[in-house]
Image (cartoon, helix red, strand yellow):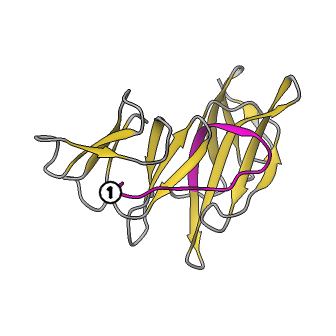
């Protein structure tokens, strides 16, 4: 999404910007906006915010990876990704044992080819494992069923009942 509302505080709203190295943040429900310089040397194309955690964590997708902020967008850290991945979407899974499960889908550049991949992290994005090679443009996990995923691919709406390992076209 280009704009997200903090699930813990509906007055906190964040939006991406076409300006380099910038997002905007509102602390009063969208009445006023403050420019935040990211200091990460990229433009974020999408923002995501963790659901159901004790503190809200922002994630942003830049042209060179996934960035994370634990302090309402003031400071950002680039998460390590395997290979030369360009991420198109992320989704959140269960929050067990104090760590958030993240899923990221995108493309890895391999010589002159691009290979679609979906990755999973069970340690807040510090390490990743590949779970499939399906071309997924948009991804969401079901809020009550952490193994149920929906996605959008070139074939239409797809569904997985096994945490993204296998997919079937549903529309």
Name the residue nearer the viewer: 52 or 126: 126
Which span is picked out in magenta? 73-92
126 magenta-colored: no
| In the image: residue 72, left or right of residue 89 | left
Element type at mark 1: loop
Quarter of the rendering occupied by the N terminus: top left
80 magenta-colored: yes
Name the residue nearer the viewer: 54 or 21: 21
- Expressed as whole percent of the image width and height from the top left, the position of residue 88 reads 61, 34
Q: Is residue 113 above or below residue 29?
A: above
- Expressed as whole percent of the image width and height from the top left, the position of residue 170 reads 67, 29
Residue 140, visible in the rendered structure: no
- Expressed as whole percent of the image width and height from the top left, the position of residue 116 reads 78, 33
Q: Is residue 27 above or below residue 122?
A: above
- Expressed as whole percent of the image width and height from the top left, the position of residue 101 reads 62, 62
Name the residue at the bottom extreme: 97
Give the quadrant of residue 155: top right
Which residue is tagged 1?
7
Residue at 74% across / 30% down in the picture? 135
Residue 160, visible in the rendered structure: yes
């Amino acid at each position: 999404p280009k704009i997200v509302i903090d699930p813990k505080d509906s007055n906190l709203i964040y939006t991406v910007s076409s300006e380099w190295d910038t997002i905007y943040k509102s602390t009063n429900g969208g009445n006023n906006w403050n420019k935040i310089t990211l200091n990460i040397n990229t433009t974020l194309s999408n923002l995501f915010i963790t659901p159901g955690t004790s503190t809200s964590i922002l994630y942003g997708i830049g042209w060179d990876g996934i960035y994370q902020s634990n302090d309402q967008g003031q400071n950002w850290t680039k998460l390590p990704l395997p290979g030369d991945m360009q991420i198109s979407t992320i989704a959140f899974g269960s929050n067990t044992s104090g760590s958030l499960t993240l899923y990221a889908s995108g493309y890895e550049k391999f010589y002159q080819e691009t290979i679609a991949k979906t990755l999973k992290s069970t340690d807040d994005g510090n390490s990743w494992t590949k779970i499939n090679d399906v071309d997924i443009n948009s991804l969401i996990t079901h809020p009550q069923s952490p193994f149920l995923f929906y996605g959008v691919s070139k074939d239409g709406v797809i569904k997985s009942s096994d945490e993204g390992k296998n997919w079937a076209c549903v529309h």
